[in-house]
Each structure stands twice: as structure tokens, then as C-alpha cells.
Amino acid sequence: MLRISRTGRHPVPCFVLTMILGALMLAGQIAATSASPGESRKKGPRDVFAQLDELFPTANVYRTASGAPGPAYWQQKVDYVISVRLDEKAKTITGEETITYHNNSPDTLRYLWVQLDQNRFRKDSKAVLSSTVSPDERKMRFEALDAILQIQEKGYGDVITAVTDATGQPLAHHVVDSFMRIDLPKPLPAKGTFTFRIAWHYVIPEGRVVGARGGYEEFKDGNAIFFLAQWYPRLAAYTDYGGWRVMPFLGSGEFTVEFGDFDVRITVPADHVVAATGTLQNPEEVLTARQRNRLKKAAKAKKPLFIITPEEAKKNEQSAATDTKTWHFKAENVRDFAWASSRKFIWDA
């Protein structure tokens, strides 16, 4: 007996169909029995009875079976010396940094990856191109439209003007979305260090509009508060469990970054007050004698004291200084550095 295929042209014997179906069923059984329990669980729905040895990587000298640091655990260290200038009118940041990378891993490194977090706001970034809005433009909120227009028109994103070694020789580098790869002039061995410099600038995004974690907020009196996070090119993490961590920054979530020491000089309008990570190194250059005396008393006080009073802050708001001051901060063994600047700040400690 013959059956006719749907085209009506190619008759297929029944016994052939039976053999094909049997072969497919047998192949499915073989695949199911050959797959390991871990593999089958990973491909299927979440198994509430999965064992820990299926979820955690195999223990080694760097990580125990629980994932905790092992006897040979290591972590990279990165030290930064940064000078940055805030242009209040242009809403820009211009900076130079000297970075010393300590390769505490057992690996030889031939390149370094640097995070350029501000590139999240480039109009051609993966974060922007993968974002979604209402397909019906009549239902789009004004805030969402404003954010889209700013990203398209403001020219956001890090502009790298120089990448050099410690002697000033240019280093080959390649920007890939929110990261930059720096090719080392020679391999960096285990326990070795490498010092290099980066110069950059960028337009500060209006944080409230584009949803930035660092940006500025402007007030009706024309003054602004600048809050700067994710503001400097910083080394991506290199780990024992995943190597370089270079997933593109899409705006949500956080990144692992290396611990290190920071020596940061921040130049702002002279009537601004700066709050930052670490300890202020030059109060005699940026505070009045009365404010320095209050700061000294606050170190031993049991209750907070004003260093800069509400009255002083209100006076600062009345006019904008044309000269600048440089605030100097140091922080040891921290994973990041953030700062804020405004003439509207009150300070207590």
C-alpha cells in the first residue's frame, strides 16, 4: 500500500515512514540517556532539588567548593592619581589620570580592559540601541521623549584624547561600546605592574532626564548640584572565575571593580563645596579659618557640627565665582571614587 505526500507527487511507502519515526524515537532516547543529570537540569525547568555540586564550580586553590576564597586566592589592585576640572557653564568634565595596575594573578596579561561608563549615553551605544519605548508615539511620556532627544543631540560619552605609557609614548587602544582595550607594549607577567595615563573629557548628562547615576540637577535660581559617579575611565575586573569582565553596560546592575588607592584633585568654582570619597588633604586651601576651626572641633564632638552653615550656603547662592579652587582627596584600599560639587551645599560633620 502507498500513501501520497501532500504535494501529491512523491509516494512514500508506509514501512519507510515507520522506520523514520522509529529512528527518531531511538535517537531521542539515546540523547536523553547520554546527557548528564547536570546538563538535563540546566536545559530544562529549574530543579528545586538540584545539588550544590551541580551549581558551584569545581573547588581549586583559588576558590573553595562554597565559592569562598581559597588558600591561593588573589585579586588585582589598581591605583589612580587623577586631576579633574569641572566646567560649570559648559557642563563638562575634563580629566587626566595616571593608573598603576598590579597584576596579582598567576597569568601573563597582554592587554587591559578599561570601563568607559559614560559611553552608555552615546546614541550608538548598546544601552541606547537596545532600549525600548512605546510603539505608539502618541502614548510616549514627555520625560521619555526628552531623554531620547538629549541623548541624540548632546553628544554624550567619553572622548579619549590620549592613552600613553609612563614615558608619554602612545599605546594602541580600541574602544568597544562601554569598554576600551589597551594593548600592552610587552606582556605583563604575574606579580608585575604597569603604569599608564589616560586623558579624557565628556559632557555631563542631566541626571534627572536620562536616568544617570552621575550627572547634574539644575535649580530655578540657575545653580546646580553636580553628582559624579562612574565619571572616570576605570579598570575592568580580572577574576579567577571569569577572566576579564567585559559585559556591555546597559544602565542597570553593577560592575565588580578592583580595590586600590586614590589620589584625586578636583578643580571647581571657588564658591563650590566638594564632598568626595576619602579624606580632605588641603582644608587650608579651600576652607576659611572659621570653617577649619569648626572642622577641627567636629573631629572630637559628640554631636554633628556645621562646617559650612546654612547662612554661608545661602550667601554662596547669590553670585557665581569666576575663579577656581582645587580640592584634594585621598582614599586607601577602596573600590571606587565618587564626588559631588555645588555652591548650595551645607556641610555638617
Image (spheres, helix red, strand yellow):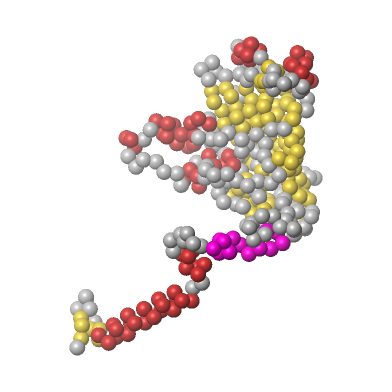
Q: Give the range drawn in magenta.
A: 51-63
Residue at 58% over, 50% down? 176
Residue 262 horizontal side relative to residue 39, left or right = right
Q: Residue 254 occupies which quadrant of the picture?
A: top right
Q: Provide the major secondary structure of the magenta segment.
A: loop
Q: Is residue 310 visible?
A: yes
Along the line of sight, which residue is nearer the eye, 264 or 94?
Answer: 264
Residue at 54% over, 15% down? 221
**Residue with the most extreme front position:** 49
Which part of the image, by quadrant, shows the N terminus? bottom left
Residue 147 horizontal side relative to residue 230, left or right = left
Q: Residue 335 occupies which quadrant of the picture?
A: top right
Residue 90 among those drawn in magenta: no
Which part of the image, by quadrant, shows the C terminus? top right
Residue at 64% over, 56% down? 67
- The percent coordinates of residue 346 (x first, y second) are 64, 19
- The percent coordinates of residue 301 (x first, y second) are 74, 20
Residue at 72% over, 62% down? 61
- The percent coordinates of residue 74 (x first, y second) are 73, 54
Residue 57 among those drawn in magenta: yes
